Amino acid sequence: MVKIIIFDLDGTLYNSTEVYQKFAEAAYYTYARIKNTDIEQAKDIIEKRREEMRNEKGFAVPYTLALLSFGISIEEWHKENINYFNAGDYLKRDEGLRSILVRLKEKYKLAVFTNNNRIQTERILEALGIKELFDYIFTYENFKRIKPDPEVFKQIIRALNFKPEECMMVGDRYYVDLLPAKEQGMEIFEVKGPEDIAHLLNFL
């Protein structure tokens, strides 16, 4: 029986072309600054690497992993994107999503589990008007590991003190958010974005 619902953040609780574009620009800026090159060259290099990694892994990889492959640490990347832009500036309150989460919270604990950093995560949740609805917020800083690493899912389960089968992972990327959760014995629910979260009311 599910007792806690764990939501991915980006692409699950919100969809925003502007935010995704800003993260891309921040990645190019980070590479260009650290590797002492120009933005256009940085963009070409990073996107080429992401394509290579997508072909190798079978799914689109985040900028975090692309930068890491060039020796740029996750901590450095997070510091740069926090300073580059505020993701909350490109989002607005989502009353529809909020009302669904309020209903779910009547029966379940709610959590967020994201590869994003704490500052951008809180900016996003505050902009959407849903931050206070979550009992737990797990970001990169909690475990210093990122999805789809199976170990971070094990650590989440231990931190929550629930049995795996009592946890449901909700996400938009099967191979990053959901398959690793399923392999740990968690329930899973795939969405294309926040508009699909309402289906949880009928599914559970």
Image (cartoon, helix red, strand yellow):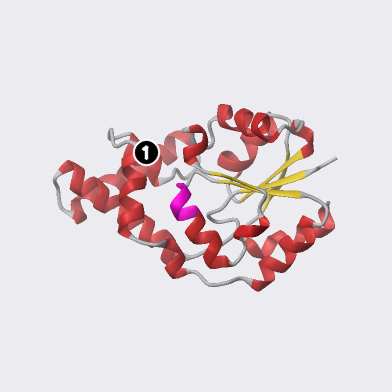
State the image coordinates of residue 15 (x, y, percent, origin top left).
54, 63
Q: Which amino acid does label 1 sit on?
A: Ile
Q: In this view, does 59 lie above or below 29?
A: above
- Residue 142 is covered by the magenta coloring: no
Query: Which residue corresponds to the image point at 31% horizontal and 55% vertical from the top-left?
Result: 83
Task: Look at the picture and state if 193 lies above or below 95.
Answer: above
User: Viewed as shown, does residue 94 lie left or right of 17?
Assistant: right
The picture quadrant where one finds residue 161 is top right
> In the visual, does 168 lie left or right of 137?
right
Quadrant containing the N terminus in the rendered view: top right
Q: Is residue 119 magenta?
A: yes
Q: In this view, does 175 lie above or below 30?
A: above
Characterize the magenta stretch by its predominant secondary structure: helix
- Whole-percent x and y of residue 178? 64, 41
Circle 1 is placed at which residue position?
Answer: 74
- Give coordinates of residue 79: x percent, y percent: 33, 47
As rendered, which of 15 and 112 lies closer to the eye? 112
Start-end of magenta stretch? 117-121
Q: How many labels does the image show?
A: 1
Q: Which residue: 59% across, 67% down?
A: 129
The picture places residue 69, in percent across and down from the top left corner, at 33, 34
Residue 80 shows in the view: yes
User: From this viewpoint, is residue 43 visible?
Assistant: no
Query: What secondary structure is marked by label 1?
Result: helix
At horizontal 56% and vertical 31% (from top left) the residue drawn is 152
Q: Residues within 10 Å of mark 1 (few under 14, many from 20)?
A: many
Q: In this view, does 12 lie above or below 49?
A: below
Viewer-side residue, 119 vs 77: 119
